[in-house]
Image (cartoon, grey):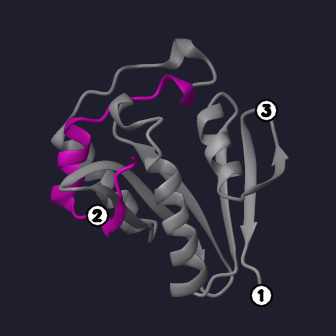
Amino acid sequence: MKKEIWLQPMTAEMYHAFFKEYQNDRDLYLDQKDYRPYVYSEDTVNAYIGRQIDRKRMPFAIMCGDEIVGELKLYDIEKNKRATLGIAMKNEKYKDRGFGTQAELLAIDYVFHEMDIPVLYADSVLTNTRSQHVLEKVGFQLIGQDEERRYYRITRDK
């Protein structure tokens, strides 16, 4: 039985807790020679938080019980028009357990019904087939591809 998850606005304290246990995902690197294990740094996390604010992103913690299992963010938000979804699970322990699928479904509902945005986009590095599978499973349609990424869209039914 899958545990229920929910989305909670991400705070600075939550970001630090998340990144203390974060692990880079090898699937995010087109060239595996570019892969480097993630090492927590307070300054790096603070800079990341600053970029989220500067870029007017809406970050959410993916919660299961009292544990942060991932990060979901909405960005490139155009009021009543469009937004883009991004998601990252904290580490391998939280992958392939349905948390990302549940989080994406919650985000789609939030964007369509709470934010009144009719179109949600997402993309995935070509090598991240796990992400592509989840996007397609929750209803995103492939709309394009280039040498690095696959691009997806889901639209709200009228």
Looking at the rendering, the stretch of residues picked out in magenta corresponds to 1-28
**Spot occupied by residue 145 in the image (x, y as percentages of width and height):** 82, 42
Mark sitting earlier along the chain (1/2): 2
Q: Which amino acid does label 3 sit on?
A: Glu
CB under 8 Å between discs 1 and 2: no
How packed mark 1 is, by other alpha carbons closer than 10 Å (few <14, some 14-19, many 20 or more), is few
Mark sitting earlier along the chain (3/1): 3
Mark sitting earlier along the chain (3/2): 2
User: Callout 2: helix, strand or loop?
Assistant: loop
Q: Mark 1 points at which residue?
A: 158
- Residue 57: in magenta span: no
Q: Distance between the residues labelled 3 and 1?
A: 34 Å
User: Which residue occupies 17% across, 56% down?
Assistant: 66
Q: Mark 2 points at which residue?
A: 10
Q: What residue type is labelled 2?
A: Met
Residue at the far right in the pictured view: 144
User: Which residue occupies 72% across, 78% down?
Assistant: 156
Q: Mark 3 points at which residue?
A: 147
